[in-house]
Amino acid sequence: MMRVAVLALQGAFAEHQAAFRDLGVETLQIRQRADLQRPFDALVLPGGESTVQGKLLHDLELFAPIRTMICQGLPVMATCAGLILLAERLVDDPVVWFGTLKATVRRNAYGRQLGSFFTRGDCGPLTDIPMSFIRAPYIEDCAPDVTVLSQYEGKITAVRQDNQLALSFHPELLPDRRLHQFFLQQMVARPDKIAV
Ligand code: GLN
């Protein structure tokens, strides 16, 4: 039985839990260091406010062990603020959190006030995925070994680098569960399979 851990410090973590529940997969919340002792097969870094989440990760001493798990190959699905936490570089911002994803990310890239919108688009092998962008970042640039899965108006909005799946948008807020299923099938059930 697969179990997915969801970082539950702030933001849209309950919605990811609901998505995995719809797919028959058990979830557990990561709120404190002791929660990392329980076995799990994958981790979700949810949307929310990356600065708040990053500070809490450090304050609660979750940061270093989670970073180690990601570096060791734990499958990670990151949405929005989660993408910012993974990025190796942020535009106009010296802060680096986990820095495990070889990508340069622009925060609030669609503007702060009117930066929320809905669209549909393809993502990797999946077509016509509903996508909710909320004060979303986009990926300005990524390394050659990072696979671009989705773009919106010429900007990269979803990538995969080995065990890391990172999305600008929020699939968990909409009823379509194909991206969560894709993550489970392609990255958790068969983590050694890199092709998308
Ligand atoms: N703008 C937020 C940040 O910088 C991300 C928004 C989101 O996760 N929906 O962290």
Image (cartoon, rainbow, N blue to C red):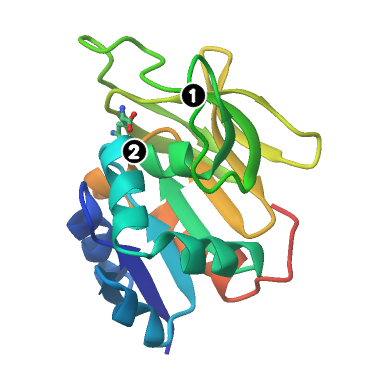
Q: In the rendered view of the protein, which quadrant contains the N terminus?
A: bottom left
Q: Is residue 8 left or right of residue 124?
A: left
For the point 24% across and 68% down, the residue is: 31
Compare marks 2 and 1 and give the one earlier in the sequence.
Answer: 2
Residue type at mark 1: give it: Tyr
Q: Which residue is mark 1?
A: 138
Residue under the image location 36 percent in, 25 percent down: 136
Give left or right: position of 190 versus 26.
right
Q: In what quadrant does ligand 1 lie?
A: top left
Residue occupying image coordinates x 49% and y 24%: 138
Label of residue 56 in the image: none
- Secondary structure under badge 1? strand
Image location of residue 44, percent across then percent down: 39, 59
Q: Number of marks in the image? A: 2
Category of crowding for the residue at label 2, using alpha-carbon neighbours closer than 10 angstroms: few (below 14), some (14–19), many (at least 20)? many
Residue type at numbered disc 2: Ser
* Residue 178 higher or lower than 155, as above or below: below
In the rendered view, tell whether residue 81 sits above or below residue 100. Answer: above
- The residue sitting at 51% across, 12% down in the picture is 153
Q: Is residue 182 left or right of residue 14?
A: right
Residue 175 horizontal/vertical position (percent): 24, 50
Task: Report which residue position mark 2 lands on.
Answer: 50
Query: Do we see residue 5 in this rendering?
Result: yes
- Number of the front mark, 2 or 1: 2
Disc 2 C-beta below 8 A from ligand 1: yes
The secondary structure type at the circle numbered 2 is helix
Within 10 Å of the Cα at label 1, are there few (<14), some (14-19), or many (20+) other Cα atoms?
A: many
The residue nearer to you, when weighing 71 against 17, is 71
Task: Tell me where residue 115 appears, x and y as whole percent.
Answer: 28, 14
Measured as percent of width and height from the top left, residue 15 is found at 21, 55
User: In which image quadrant can residue 40 be found?
Assistant: bottom left
Q: CA distance from mark 2 to mark 1?
A: 14 Å
